[in-house]
Image: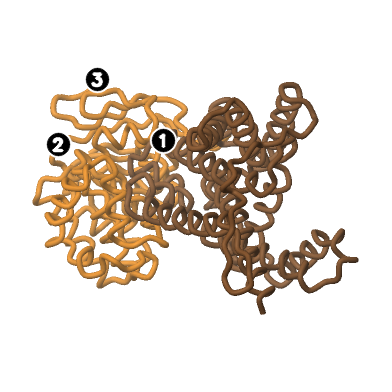
Chain colours: A brown, B orange
Amino acid sequence: MQLAFQQFINALSLGSIYALVALGVAILFSILRLANFAHGELMTTAGFTLYMTLASGWNWVLAVIAAIAASVVAALILERVAYRRLRNAQPLTLLMTSFAVSVALQSIFLLTFGARPKGIELPAFVDASFRIGGMRVQWLDIAIILITAAIVFGLTLFLRKTVIGLALRSAADDFQTTRLMGVKANALFVGAFVLSGMLAGIAALFYFATVPNVVPSSGFEPMLKGFIACVIGGLGSLPAAIVGGFLLAFLEVGSDALLSDNFSPYLDAIVFLIAIVILRWRPGGIFGVRLTAEQRV
Amino acid sequence: MATQGAILSIAGLSVSYGTVHAVRQLDMEISEGETVVLLGANGAGKSSTLNAIVGLAPRSGGRLVFAGEDITRKPTEAIIRSGLALVPEGRRLFSNMTVRENLRLGAAALSTAEFDRERQALEDMFPITRRRAHEQAGLLSGGEQQQVAIARALLARPKLLLLDEPSLGLAPIIVNTIFEIIAELKRRKVTILLVEQNAERALSIADRAYVLAQGRLELSGAAGSINATTLEKAYLGEREHA
């Protein structure tokens, strides 16, 4: 029972990280039909910023702000340099571009920081824990879960109560008609990239707090999990991305807990197999989002 | 080129989709307070004309002057912000959003206070926007959606309202309601460019009419001067200017 509760907390915490990554991916996909594989590199940018600032003795609050800011700035640079001119391009062109951007950024990280892992000197409180009954629960997990809940709540308010939030939602539904409302296309794209970058930055903080070293390819795995979460939930829908993130984490933690240690090297393969079965059953994801030609930008 | 008092002047407008010429060398003018109807058979280029005015259709030639400003090369959002509003064919409400959220987007450039004022001013004319404010727009009937779509376009107080086939696909009794709304807008001196299949109803409400056939202007003149015979000739492409 105790173990089950502990695993439940683990799954919620891991699910929170996946959900944040998936949300960042889904925002760009829903509006631009852009599968941004460079989303992982936005997280790596935040990771290296965290490494550099903490190693230089910055206060952790400032380091956190700098890491999120770096990820947002990187997202804005990508929008301006790589994606803006491709706004009306075919999805395949966008996909290839995002791969190219991802590889280019990894190369820049490699040239700048080298291939060896850089240990992030996290503040001591990250490891702090408390006990309930006989169980040890990390404060970090609780913080990740609560902050993610607050972000999802804040994002929901933003998307429902502000004009730019409404416009982001309507653009995901029908981009042309959104322009007919007098909403500037550039503002929408910049808004979407800022949100996506911010979510990547926050997800990176949580990710590197649990895996405290950064290499040029660090962002790949969480990005891949975020994408799978999106696809399981239903690509293009934000609530579906959140559900997909938690589902993926529960599958992962559940498989790990239920299967013997002999299977642990195959954990990802087992989880992906379950994901394939889900998609065989519902090809559009659990929420069955259908993408018609009209919905595309 | 532009006549005194013309809110919109179109000179030599051409629209092409690849090798298909949807509109050829169209000249048109709309004066402030006028209700002008653009008629034509299916595929005559009516919707392409409206979409070209707001920059959504590819213009291959011509010049557009709106409220004294050349809008030929402006992006859609800038044209809308200069005072044009289009109610697109098929209404195109954001179906997953509530009626109120749809309306808020129609007034994207306004502050919340201004939006509330404008919205309340329109509620008498469009009671549906109050009664079903918090329902998903996609759940409304076609006629109700059309009313919300027109209200959404009016919220920014446009200098010229473009209506693309507002009666399309609606039951006859609902069509009456939509034409009553257009008549009321005319009484309120809203300048309107209306595209309609229902020529008889449209001519009964309009001041002037333009008739397109295969992308070309076939007939233009006072709405009262156009009857079934001249219209039929124009639809068949027999050029005449009343």
Report the amino acid beneath label 2. Answer: Glu
Q: Please tell me whether residue A28 is drawn above or below residue A59 in the rendered image.
A: below
Quadrant that contains the C terminus of chain B: top left
Viewer can see residue A125: yes
Report the amino acid beneath label 3. Answer: Met
Which circle, 3 or 1, is nearer the viewer? 1
Q: Nearer the viewer, residue B219 or B76?
A: B76
Which quadrant of the view contains residue A229? bottom right
Q: Chain of mark 3?
A: B
Quadrant that contains the N terminus of chain B: top left
- Label 1 sits on residue: A187
On the image, the x and y values in percent for residue A279 come to 71, 66
- Label 2 sits on residue: B32
Q: Chain of mark 2?
A: B
- Label 3 sits on residue: B1
Q: Nearer the viewer, residue A262 or A188?
A: A262
Q: Chain of mark 1?
A: A
Report the amino acid beneath label 1. Answer: Ala
Which circle, 2 or 1, is nearer the viewer? 1
Residue at position x 13%, y 29% in the image:
B5
On the image, the x and y values in percent for residue B32 come to 14, 36
Whole-Å distance between the Cαs marked 2 and 3?
16 Å
Q: Secondary structure at mark 2?
A: loop
On the image, the x and y values in percent for residue B94 come to 39, 57
Residue at position x 45%, y 34% in the image:
B15
Discs 2, 1: same chain: no
Q: Nearer the viewer, residue B57 or B132?
A: B132
Please rate how many residues cluster around mark 2, counting C-alpha atoms within 10 Å: few if below 14, some from 14 to 19, many from 20. some
Mark 2 or 3 closer to N-term?
A: 3
**Image mark for residue B178:** none
Please rate how many residues cluster around mark 1, counting C-alpha atoms within 10 Å: few if below 14, some from 14 to 19, many from 20. few
Which quadrant of the view contains residue B175? bottom left
